[in-house]
Amino acid sequence: MTHAEPVIKITGLATRFGQHIIHENINLTVLKGEVLALIGGSGSGKTTLMRQMLGLITPAQGSVEVLGATRYNCGHEEERKLRIRSGVLFQQGALFSALTVFDNIALPMRELHTLRETIIRDLVMLKLSMVGVEAQHVHKRPSELSGGMIKRVALARSLALDPELLFLDEPTAGLDPALSESFVELIRSLREELGLTIIMVTHDLDTLVAISDRVAVLADRHIVALGPIPEIITIDHPFITAFFGGTRGRNALRVLQPS
Amino acid sequence: MPSNLPADHRARYQLVTLETGATCLQLTGSYTLISLNQSLPVIAGELAQLAKQSGLYWDLTNIHQLDYANAVMLWQIWGRQRPDHLLLRPEQEKMFLRLEKTALLPEPVQRKWFLPISLLGQQLLRFLDHLAGMITLSGQIVLDILYLIAHPGRIPAREISANLYRTGAQALGITAIVGFLIGIVLSYLSSEQLHMFGADVYIVNILGMSIIRELGPMLAAILVAGRSGSAMTAQLGVMRVTEELDALTVMGIPHSLRLVLPKIIGLGFALPLIVLWTSAVALIGGFLAAELQVGLSIRYALTALPDAVPIANLWLALGKGVVCGMAIALIACHFGLRIKPNTESLGEGTTNSVVTSITAVIIIDAIFAIAFSNIGIRIAG
């Protein structure tokens, strides 16, 4: 991954909500094929930064380039391609409650208007098998599914169009330890299989240690540290010492130490 | 084709004859949704034509990039099985292994064919269910009122005044506009007719009776049912979705006392006042139009009004306002509390609430009309 090309390039980004300044001069590059985790305290603007990469919020200053195209004012056709090439897993899954599991995953495929319904049918079943959801659940509504199942179906939907880029917002929030471990394992295997670039916002130390290649730490309106976890933990910053230095942090980091 | 895609990455295919004499179909370039875009159905059709040849060799090793959508496309062209002669790269091998293991889409569970009779029965049961729910809720409200009489300190005064403001004060603008315009329309239409008979002065009787007794209360109630009823249902529904209702329950705060009762009392006070306001504005609009149209002075119209319309009509209108207001709030809360935590239920509940409360308002009006048919009406002669 030494000479990998940048997938996302953020330069000089600043965000303000009224008088409140969230980000100041943020520069960040995400490389092809890596898993970058965004961490930071509550209210540090991790989710805001991710939403800016998704084009849901426009920053006050600076530019965001995704897959070689500027995220804002990039034209309708370019925008459409970006949407096809990236997938998002929202924190609560954001499945459409009026549609069945099948229709939820088929929706982005149908929106392309190039795939025939027979292909869509097989493709949906394929995506569901990828995320380990049995065929019997395919005609259920999201309200009939458990929390873990909703996350899996939402992941299948985000992978519907074979994206290169995947955004995960708190992928393991609200899952029990066993479920989150299997979910992390699933993300890791899919990443290997599909060659995904992943940008992830998480609070969960175990998830962080398990799948991230690099970590970007957001604090005091800036990215205060960027690098692999072993490098990050050596940096002396109040947020980092509090985040990794606590009991939970030390337990999670034990995985990294050579036994 | 995306401009940033190199020319040699475009999806192509060619037929080559192998040394053995067999024909081989070589696929080259990128077979992805992005690179194929609109040409995907075209290429799929062409490949399906070629696939009809027997003994065809398929060579996928030169494909630059293959995504699952196109893998499925090929898989279906092959009839859900590998062709006899197929060359794959290891990562493509994995993709087709996955496809082999994928289950087919199960048939949806057959919906029962509802006969008209059972459909009707279901509707009836649903109606009875709602009726029972509303009676239960109003019974609960009566119990709450008895409880509040015993414990006057627990009266949710803040909530009541907030509801009074939201459903009353904030509705003044819209009811005034509608009332004023209806008054003008009514006056224009009837004053022309009366003028023909030289009975201009009776415009006061016509406008006064129809607006004070009937139109004012109905306009106000229907507007408020649409405006405040839907807001109440949606508010309770969203509180269900965000688990705020459950939070209240675990704190030991009953929904009926803190959420439903203030709405019913608030609208019970607000609607008669709005009725008064709407009627007044409609009368002003009507008299103004009469002055412009047939030259009947507003001063005369106002002095003649008490003689033309017995005061009982005003009490009747206020009574309608109280009953309709409480009914609208009760219906809105009933539907709001029944919303399930999903978006579809929210929309359905709000629609049902508004439709039901407007129907209820008209039924209440009809009941009033029959029950008080001999009150407030002076029969000439």
Image (cartoon, grey):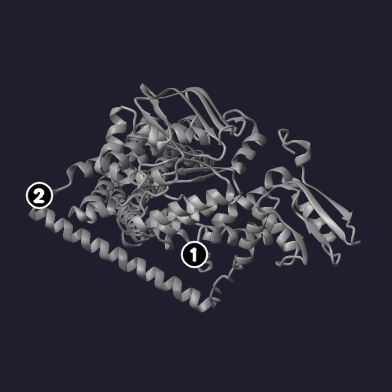
Residue behind mark 1: A140
* Label 2: element kind: helix
Return the x and y of residue A121 as percentages of the image width and height. 63, 61
Q: Nearer the viewer, residue B361 or A11?
A: A11
Return the x and y of residue B97 as percentages of the image width and height. 63, 62
Three-letter amino acid code of the residue under disc 2: Pro
Nearer to us of marks 1 and 2 is: 1
Q: Horizontal placement of B163 versus B39: left or right?
A: left
Task: State the quadrant of the C terminus of chain B.
Answer: bottom left
Residue behind mark 2: B152
* Both marks 1 and 2 on one chain: no
Up-down relation of residue B300 to residue A167 (above or below): above
Three-letter amino acid code of the residue under disc 1: Lys
Return the x and y of residue B185 as percentages of the image width and height. 50, 40
Chain bearing mark 1: A
- Going 33% across and 38% down the picture, which residue do you hit? B277
The alpha-carbon separation of the residues under discs 1 and 2 comes to: 50 Å
Residue B280 in view in this figure: no
Q: Residues within 10 Å of mark 2 (few under 14, many from 20)?
A: few
Residue A203 in view in this figure: yes
- Going 51% across and 53% down the picture, which residue do you hit? A189
Chain bearing mark 2: B
Name which quarter of the figure residue B9 lies in: top right
